[in-house]
Amino acid sequence: MIEQHLLCYGDSVSWGIIPGTRQRHVYEKRWPGILQALLGSKVRVIEECLNGRTTAWDDPFRPNRNGKDQLLPALQSHAPLDLVILFLGTNDMQTVYGVNAYASSLGAGVLVDTVLSCRAEPMQHPPKVLLVSPPRIVRPCGAMVEKFRGAEEKSAEFTHWYRRIADERGCGYFDAAEVVHPSVVDGVHWDEAQHQQFATAMHTHVTQLLATAKSRHLPKGIA
């Protein structure tokens, strides 16, 4: 029986674009699918990932990419939730937005606040939050060159600013840059080995947060 529910809220990195293509890694090779296998059948891992999704910016060419606008409906749709992993920010570095890592972190902060204030039926407590600082964008190639021009330097500041948001909100934090570097094929997305590395590294953090979330529902004296 499923005992806990985990929502992964992300962009094309989590959706699983195969670098240099518009194809998608199969579920078992994407990090949410790998994490599902690691956690086992008592936890349900829900993918809510969309190509081009930002933290809080409207794409002038493609509608419905603003993560801030889509988050609350997703939380309400998938409730009850024990943990929400927020893994956005990479697309904020696109040239079209003119955004730096500091501004991106403010968008991430709005997402964290949305989750922490959520009491979607039938939840009595908001879900726990794990905020993921995106990895650095490294030497964008091919179609990514103009799309992410200048992003390599800006994305180097993700760690500092995203950690500040997590510290201010008191939520979980994970720095993807410590374990993953994007594929050399396009400088942004991940190959199968990188999805595996990320899911394996995340497993311990997720398990700990799910344990604290579960303890809130136990009678006093049992937790």
Image (spheres, grey):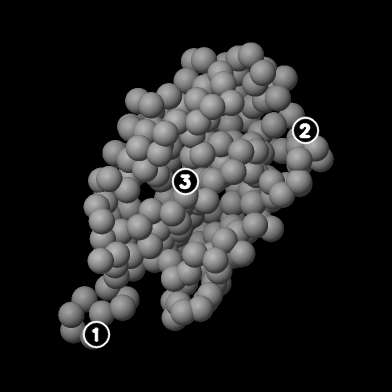
Q: In this view, does 27 lie above or below 149?
A: below
Asked if the residue under mark 1 is in contact with the one under mark 2, i.e. CB atoms within 8 Å, the reply is no
Residue lying at 64% horizontally and 51% vertically, measured from the top left: 67
- Structural crowding at the residue carrying mark 1, measured as other residues with C-alpha within 10 Å and reported as few (<14), some (14–19) or many (≥20): few
Label 2 secondary element: helix
Q: Where is residue 49 in the image (x, y as percent from the top left)?
A: 54, 46
Label 3 secondary element: strand
Placement of the C terminus among the 4 image quadrants: bottom left
Q: Which callout, 3 or 1, points to the residue nearer the camera?
A: 1
- Structural crowding at the residue carrying mark 2, measured as other residues with C-alpha within 10 Å and reported as few (<14), some (14–19) or many (≥20): some
Residue lying at 45% horizontally and 77% vertically, measured from the top left: 123
Give the side of residue 48 with respect to residue 57, left or right.
left
Give the side of residue 131 with respect to residue 111, left or right.
left
**Residue occupied by mark 1:** 219
Q: Earlier in the sequence, mark 2 or mark 1?
A: 2
Q: Where is residue 180 in the image (x, y as percent from the top left)?
A: 41, 29
Quarter of the image holding residue 216? bottom left
**Residue occupied by mark 2:** 96
Query: In whole angstroms, how far apart are the C-alphas of marks 3 and 1?
Result: 31 Å
